[in-house]
Image (cartoon, rainbow, N blue to C red):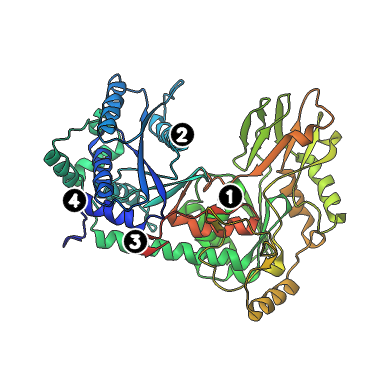
Amino acid sequence: MRPDGTLSPETATRRFLSSLDQPSRILVAISGGSDSTGLLLALSDALKADPTSKISLCAATVDHALRSESADEARDVAALCRSLDIPHVIKLWQGAKPKAGVMAAARDARYGLLAEGAGDLGADIIVTGHTLDDQRETFAMRGERSAATVTGIADAVLFDRRIWVARPLLLSLRADIRTMLTGRGVGWADDPSNEDVKYERVRMRRSLAGEGTSIVELAAMTASRMALDEAAAGWVYAHVDVHEGMLARVGVAGLSVDRAVLGHGLARLAAVIGGQPFALGAEQIGAVLDFLAAARPGRMTAGRVVFDLRRDGLYLARETRGLVPLAVGAGQRGLWDGRYLVANGSGVELTVGAVGAAGDALAAKASVETEAAASASVVVGQQAPTSLSLIPVLVTGIQQRRVGAVRESSVPKDLGTLDSCDKHRNEGGEEGGAETAGSEEDTDRAGERSAAMPNTRQHLPKSALTRALAAQPRILASDAPQNLASHIEIMPYFAPFDRFLTRLDLMVAASLAAAFGTRPYPKPPLGLIDGKTI
């Protein structure tokens, strides 16, 4: 590492390759610009120098079709890949482009197409050419918007719960990458949008003029953010229980922890329950924390979530306003309310709406069901909520967590995450009949907590349960077949994590997945990043 902490692109890529689980196949996202071209060449050189490596390369270029030159640039990249004997695919962003927010839409489409390309070429990880320059710009832009702990570009991001995207060059400068390419006699394409001052990043780039936050400061801020995430994950693990209808409860002890930890955890828990892609902002979560600090039972709403403070703890449920119906065509999939993925395997179009007034009936039904019954239901019917038949359609991939399985200790590093070879553990902590290891002290703590709090439906506050169930999905279909329910799959969706989950949020996301009983998030296929164990 150089005195200023930067890494040459060659050193950065070698360090990345040494951290990667083997065997592995890397998909390089290459646009033809200097950063991604330099990444491809540096990776190719490093692998050629190590004939024993079990890592291979492939590449993909996304043509956004936003500029007339983009198709030619993609073909130039394809020619470069052929010269390096690297398999390459071009993915075209098809269809109409939005008039507003085109950059955000292009980003989302780009990652989707890269994941598709990874599937086509058999890759198990994607790498992009983000640099230290990009990192400094991101910190500066976010720092102008918030006085809170600022985060930059994560070194690894899980996309769509299916493939990890790594950024090996975050400690490398663009100038060094271009020097490397010039020395190799390799050119690159410059995207005109990188000079268009209508974009915030371009304006920030010009104002920084190659300077910005030092690597030492960047590392300190990232470490602080990671520590907060770990503490919040432990808070979720120790104090949060989730019941039917996505009704979450925070025990009394969980409300007296450090304010920063409580705010971080609550902001992300609320985003999951409210179906919001971002955690509550500083002003919103500040108001919630002030409400809780007053310690007076009552309710307030923030981020589409009702915070219901009672003597036995805080209950969180989706508010019943703004629940917009969603049409899902035959054989199609759709995301309802940012909280549930609906897969329609029937031969008719469905409309997904909220249970609404039927929540009272469901709450009454839930109060007499046994503890082993399904923890969430979807109502199928053809008329208004008052005439719905209570035919349960199980929400797959979500279970009520048993209070007796909760430990008060810190969250395990691997909670809620899976290696590719792992099996999903059931809520009792079993895998293939073997119990998860736990101390007698853990068991005693769990028993004490179980006795101290309501953990059955009969003891849940009826109004809170009714509110939660009223915001659950129900299915309406014209000419619905008698066995409609068997053709519908409804899965919980964590809006702040399930599309893009950064490594900075991995621990708290994993802890929330465990609390909700959903499938775990896959671990990054990296043993070390920047010298730290993942």
From the viewer's perspective, tell me whether residue 321 is left or right of residue 214: right
View extreme (top): residue: 68
Q: Where is residue 341? Give x, y as percent.
A: 63, 39
Q: Report whether residue 335 is seen.
A: yes
Q: Amino acid at mark 2?
A: Asp
Q: Can you identify the residue that label 1 sits on?
A: 272
Q: Amino acid at mark 1?
A: Val
- Tell me which residue sits at (78%, 62%) in the image: 456
Q: Report whether residue 267 is seen.
A: no
Near-viewer residue (292 or 120): 120
Q: Can you identify the residue that label 3 sits on?
A: 221
Measured in 3D between alpha carbons, the distance from the residue under mark 2 to the one under mark 3, in whole angstroms, is 38 Å
Q: Around disc 3, counting alpha carbons within 10 Å, would you say few (fewer than 14), some (14 to 19), or many (20 or more)?
A: some
Image: 2 above or below 374: below
Query: Sequence-wise, which precedes: disc 2 or disc 3?
Result: 2
Query: Sequence-wise, which precedes: disc 1 or disc 3?
Result: 3
State which quadrant residue 382 falls in.
top right
Query: Sequence-wise, which precedes: disc 4 or disc 2?
Result: 2
Q: Amino acid at mark 4?
A: Glu
Label 1 close to label 3 by CB (< 8 Å)? no
Q: Which mark is residue 211?
A: 4
Near-viewer residue (10 or 188): 10
Q: Can you identify the residue that label 2 sits on?
A: 120
Q: Where is residue 228? Give x, y as percent.
A: 45, 64
Q: Amino acid at mark 3?
A: Met
Query: Sequence-wise, which precedes: disc 4 or disc 3?
Result: 4
From the viewer's perspective, tell me whether residue 387 is left or right of residue 211: right
Measured in 3D between alpha carbons, the distance from the residue under mark 4 to the one under mark 2, in whole angstroms, is 40 Å
View extreme (front): residue: 52
Q: Where is residue 408? Give x, y as percent.
A: 61, 73
Label 2 close to label 3 by CB (< 8 Å)? no
